[in-house]
Image (cartoon, rainbow, N blue to C red):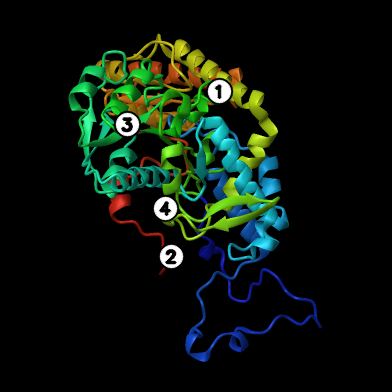
Amino acid sequence: MEKIIFEYSQAGKEGVTLPAGVKSAKSPAELIPADLLRKTELKLPEVSEPEVVRHFTNLSTMNHHVDKDFYPLGSCTMKYNPKINDRLAGLSGLANIHPLQDENLAQGALQILYELEQYLCSITGMKAATLQPAAGSHGELTGVLLMKKYFEKKNETRRYILIPDSAHGTNPSSAASARFETISLKSNERGCIDLDDLRAKMNPEVAGLMLTNPNTLGLFEEVVGEITHIVHSHGGLVYMDGANLNALLGIVRPGDMGFDITHINLHKTFATPHGGGGPGSGGIAVTEKLVDFLPVPRIVKNDGRYSLDHNYPDSIGKVLGFYGNFGIIVRAYCYIRMMGREGLEAVSRNAILNANYMRKKLGGVFEIPYDRVCMHEFVASGERQHQRSGLKTLDIAKRLLDYGFHAPTVYFPLIVKEALMIEPTESESKETMDRFVEALIKIDQEGQADPEKLHHAPWTTPVRRLDELKANKELNVCWGK
């Protein structure tokens, strides 16, 4: 077990020492008003540079991450992040730019923002985009606020948002945050929206529908054209949760399917680092009738020069202090430029191929409730193992850690009992997927022979199974004696 860095601390140790004769910058006492200076020493560990490096290196190997091995987190698209994108985003002219910098000195940055918006419009079939939202759920909220503004402009009072029972939990949360009430839509026996239920619940008080496509079962909504037609026939808007855009690149566009708004998780679809609460980027793209409501400032190009334009009186205003998470935006821009249209289409086709390969390989071991051709992910169920050996999906997920894999998403979507939501992404090889399948087969065999072994897994990780409820309720991340 790695120690806390304070446990390495010894009085008098220094991480760096300036050579004799080298003058440092002004001291804090010269730069900060006296009434703002600390009266006591800051309690920081006193350690050497090698101790700092080794400590954080050791910590990094304790955690599971996509650079370490397979991370099949369904709906989260934990694909490998090309390191060249990190290198380019770290160039001094990009990494050291300031958000309040004069536009004349930020033309390159503004060009990246402008061109990425254009690329996203081309990919989604939409008219305009914004990169301000800092996460996918933030993009959802921004999109729903656009819907609200649209109906306010038309002097229409609409109270409800329709949300499928398989939707991401952030969908109803975003709708409620924008002061809409939500109505749940049922799924049919094929795992898609029940059209009769949609027809029954769509009325002039409904602002619109939030639909994930492909949905969280990894299935493409087969009659999406009919779905958008039903909503539009009542004057409503259709929002596409773009969390699963990794299955559509270069194949089909949300705008062509009749969607009015879509958010794009740059940090998922376009391979930028994410996890652990951030960073993210949840830009949205919209059709012509919603352009005027987009957040300000908007990036415009006139005579080869880029600028930030605030002159949009119908805008919902700012949704972020500055213009998006720029480091993530740069990485996504590099990814799209390097991949090109053919490369992006190959991404989705390979993701679909990988998911269906794993679905077929695991079908004999786990129940697949909607066992038909899927898109980039599929949902298995541990209900068979639960009925046979008393195992929970959580037991299977924890045991996977002993085999060196992160678990899939578990217990989601809620309409599948003991769900395991598996997304291999396009960046995993057949060999890696085979190792994962073999691990799950062995775990199934272990569960039949010795279920107690799985009930207490993991056995080989730095910490054992934690009391997650206690950790959430009594979070303590401070060191003190």
The residue shown at (49%, 85%) is 36
Dot 3 surroundings within 10 Å: few (below 14), some, or many (20 or more)? many
Q: Say which label, 1 or 2, has the lower sequence index.
A: 1
Q: Residue at x 34, y 21 (%)?
A: 450
Q: Which residue is mark 4?
A: 315
Residue 375 visible in the displayed image: yes
Q: Secondary structure at mark 4?
A: loop
Crowd tier of the residue under label 4, counting other residues whose Cα lies within 10 Å: few below 14, some 14–19, many 20 or above: many
**Residue 339 at what x, y percent from top left?**
67, 30
Q: Nearer the viewer, residue 72 or 216?
A: 216
Q: Quadrant of residue 206?
A: top left
Q: Earlier in the sequence, mark 3 or mark 4?
A: 3
Q: Which residue is mark 3?
A: 167
Tag shown at residue 9: none
Q: Quadrant of residue 385?
A: top left
Residue at the disc numbered 1? 348
Which circle, 1 or 2, is nearer the viewer?
1
174 on left or right of 298: left
